[in-house]
Amino acid sequence: MDRTKILVVDDNPMIRKGLSVRLRANGYEVSFAEDAISATAALAKQKPDLVILDLGRHGAIAQKRPSGEHPGDCADRPRFGW
């Protein structure tokens, strides 16, 4: 059985370490990104089941929907903002 994959996005190494210890101890597969750019790449490559995101990120990227697209049309795409 595959383990649940979790991507943690946070620039604070202490938070990443603490979450890593707790999540791995509970059987999760954990990966990390320090900013929105590396998180976007990790989302595309790793396809995590869950993303834990630091909402206070100053380097977050706001993505706009292409013209004519409705919110339901892009539910499978990552969105970042502050």
Image (tube, rainbow, N blue to C red):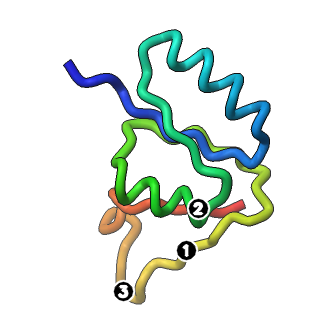
Q: How many tags in the picture?
A: 3
Measured as percent of width and height from the top left, residue 56 is found at 79, 51
The answer to which image quadrant residue 12 occupies is top right
Question: Camera-side residue: 73 or 48?
Answer: 48
Q: CA distance from mark 3 to mark 1?
A: 15 Å
Q: Earlier in the sequence, mark 1 or mark 2?
A: 1
- Is 24 above or below relative to 57? above
Callouts 1 and 2 close, C-beta under 8 Å:
yes
Measured as percent of width and height from the top left, residue 17 is found at 69, 28
- Is 48 above or below relative to 63? above
Q: Residue furthest bottom?
A: 67
Report the residue marked by disc 3: 68
Report the residue marked by disc 2: 80
Q: Is residue 8 left or right of residue 56?
A: left
Amino acid type, callout 1: Gln
Question: Camera-side residue: 71 or 18?
Answer: 18
Q: Quadrant of the N terminus?
A: top left
Q: Residue at x 76, y 38 (%)?
A: 13
Q: CA distance from mark 3 to mark 2?
A: 20 Å
Q: Secondary structure at mark 3?
A: loop
